[in-house]
Image: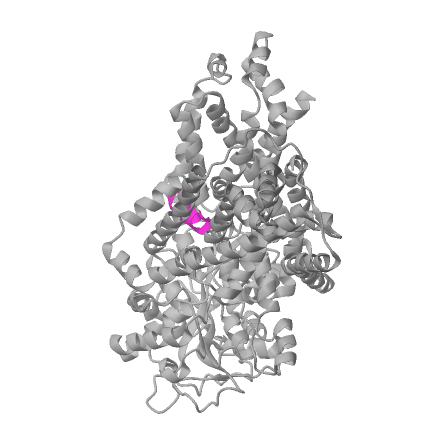
Amino acid sequence: MNQAAAVKPAFPDSLSLAALAVAGLLCLPLAYVAYMALTANAAIWSRLWTTRIPELLFNTTALALGVAAGTLVLGVSLAWLVARREFPGRQIWEWALVLPLAIPTYVLAYIYSHLLGTGGPVESAWQVLAGPGSHLLSPHSYAGVTLVMTLDTFPFVYLLARAAFLNLNVSYEEVARACGASRAGTLFRITLPLMRPAIVAGLSLVILYVVSDFGAVSLLRYQTLTYAVYQQITGRYDPTAASILSLLLVVVALIFLVAERWFRQRSRFFQTTGRYRAPARRQCGPLAATLATVYTTGVFAASFGVPACMLAMWSVSAVSSGAVDARFFGFVWNSAFLSGLAATCAVLIGLPLAYLASRRPSRVNLLCLQAAYAGYVLPGPVGALALLAIVSHLAPFWYGTAAVLVIAYVVHFLPAGLQSMEPALQQVTPNLEEASRSLGFGTAATLRRVTLPLVQSGFIAAWVLMFLQSMKELPATLLLRPVGFDTLAVRVWLEASEEYYQLAAPSALLIVIITIPAILLLLSKDWRAA
Amino acid sequence: MNQYRFHYFGLAALCIALAIGTVPDAAEPDRLVVYSGRAERLIKPLLDSFQASTGIQVDLLSSGTTEVVNRLQAEGERTPADLLITNDAGSLERARELGLLRPPTAPNNTAAIPAQFRAADNSWIGLSGRFWVVVYNTTLVKPTDLRSLLDLAEPRWKDRIAIPNAGSEYLQAGISVIKTVYGDDRTKRFLDGLKVNAGTQVYGKSSQIVEAVAKGQVALGVVNHYYVYRHLATQPDAPIAVLMPDQHEGGMGAIINVSGAGIVTHARHAESAKRLMNYLVSEEGQKQFSDLNKEYPLHPLVAADPALPPYKTTRVAPVPLTQLGKLREPAMALIEQAGLR
């Protein structure tokens, strides 16, 4: 700490002011929504309470909890299989089970709406077996949406649980076994309780994802707060009701976030030394190996294999009917341009915030960093609603330009980027910067030749992450896109929402293809560590 | 190596410069910006053929009608839009009341469109007509099973109907008409019944309602007529048919609405916008609305698709289109009180 304080500030003090200003701007949308909602006419509040709010709150919470339960079972069981058991193909499944993250929810939703829908292939097959007129679960129901969201988000839990299984100190388990506990008893009484922090972190990611999802719920017509906010913005002249629902949505997201923090504080485990050897993988017998293969194959097929094949097939027929034309490549360029710009701006904005918080952790600087996390609880439609109003008051010349959309992306995705920029900066010891300064480099040269090269990989990871998320973003893009500036995500949604599945496929497939290598790149670091 | 790394910042600066460079330039001559509240595939073919014949480049923003009117209002005099196209006369009236549309200064060939399909001051002109009809699955429902839209609220249709969501301008216009004809109490009861009967079958797009009826997911739906005929044009064997509601003696009559267009007050390419308007109401343009979209052309010399119920013999609800703007807010209040999605 003393060392950090002793270092001359590498940036001039105006930087602190800039950070403060940026943090203020990042918080503005949240503040605006709260202000609009709290100053709204009481009659509108009471109308919403008696008509829409109970249903929306119930639906949103029920979906979040249902998906959390589903991902808990899928994620932990799959992580346990690949981390603790040896069966043919295990190494392939180990990374293949991450691939569902490459499919945006709106893509998986529209594929399942075709597969499970009335007259779709699954129902037709089922009617051959069970007789005409029988129905399986509808994709346009609670169960259907839960299924789709679970298949799309279980890798969050899987990834964190897998890392925890691999990093656990095996001594605890060996002691339990030596004291006579059975294998299953050890798993449920020792291993899983020790993994609680990792599992809770995964589940909180899933829940935030579900609560702020627009793509799947809109295509499957399941009424959540996020979807209702979008409908209010697009279907009403008066934005008051939209801002009331937005505030509720923010509160719901905050409750889940705070609950997760609280839980993590309570169940903090310390490991005095690192694990001294990797946990052994038990060889599966033929029956167990078959079961493991069937299970992993099934989950993989449902969450990635079958959807990817459907997209490929549809794309082929869309291409042969001439759907991939100059216009299509225009959408590709729009997507690349907007996401690239947003990711770059976000890195540039995040740098001073993260730098000040790690080098000069004064209360103000730490607060600025925390403020940047406000975007976490600002789902796409809410951010768009606030920005539309703020921009039309403060910077009307930006209204309807790409700038507003880029701001929306930055506000919404900076938190995710900061999570990889912050540790990157913290890992650089201030001694190196001191040494550079004492050897005669100025502040700018130190930054350029010492700090930036050292944090480069963390910042590239942040850039890639924010690029991907901006490229997949749907609701804010729909609401804020400039004239003639459709992106791939917008095209998928527009075509799919009119059930033109084949026309939607090339854009969807391209998003998936771009996302896969990036996901593998982001994971490779975590992979080596494990 | 180190200099190389610093290039990321150069790249960033370049990106930002590019972004500033792409802000639309106001001075381009042969360009036209259209804000449209209609489904893209219903309007883009017409704009494409206009672009091909005149060489004027048409940039299209296709979104919800209410959304584009909101946007036009927020953008004020900075709007890039030249022409507003919507799927609903009520929204056009609202845009006119807000001063977003400019009345024509000189008479032009939009005069072919009959007076009941245009604003009093001609600031918007109807382009194509549509009826709000019941679409039914022919294997599940007999055409004699109901005769009025209001029958949809009867308990026997519980879980068997599909309706548009509360943001739908068709629904808002429809409820405006029903409220005017039947009064608040009857309309409230109708909305409550509609909400119960539809359950979760509330859709954002009319094409989805037709699809759901064709698959037998529901027995009936309320949509604009042309979604049904467009579906039948691609899938002639689909078990669906149109029931024109409220045609009985003493009945309210079918609810009619128009898609329409108006030149934006702050248009930068008003001349080009006027040319596009003239094209859309010309016989050539009107024929496309009829052939491609299966809508009713409003130009008296252009015939509607013969498969459609003839306009002349259809009993039409007695609420003028120009009233739909004023009726919107009170109708919305009823819809929201009922808690429709």
The image quadrant where one finds the C terminus of chain A is: top right
Is residue B313 left or right of A139 when viewed as pictured?
left
Instruction: Give residue A524's quadrant in the image.
Output: top right
A144 shown above or below B217:
above
A367 shown above or below A124:
above
Numbered marks: total = 0
Residue closest to the eye, A529 or A371: A529
Q: Say how the picture is coloured.
A: one colour
- At x 66%, y 46%, the residue is A84
Task: State the image coordinates of residue B8 (x, y, percent, origin top left).
Answer: 62, 29
Residue closest to the eye, A282 or A104: A282
Is residue A156 left or right of A373 when viewed as pictured?
right
In the rendered structure, does residue A51 fall within the stretch colored magenta?
Answer: no
Task: State the image coordinates of residue A408 (x, y, percent, origin top left).
Answer: 48, 43
Task: State the image coordinates of residue A437 (x, y, percent, origin top left).
Answer: 56, 10
Residue closest to the eye, A86 or B113: A86
Kindly tell me whether residue A449 is visible in this rendering: yes
Kindly tell me whether residue B274 is visible in this rendering: no
Task: State the image coordinates of residue B107 (x, y, percent, origin top left).
Answer: 43, 65
As drawn, which residue projects farthest toward the left?
Answer: A42
In the rendered structure, does residue A387 fall within the stretch colored magenta?
Answer: yes
Q: Which residues are magenta?
A: A379-391
- At x 57%, y 42%, the residue is A179
How would you classify the magenta stretch by its main secondary structure? helix
- At x 61%, y 80%, the residue is A130
B140 shown above or below B274:
below
A318 shown above or below B81:
below
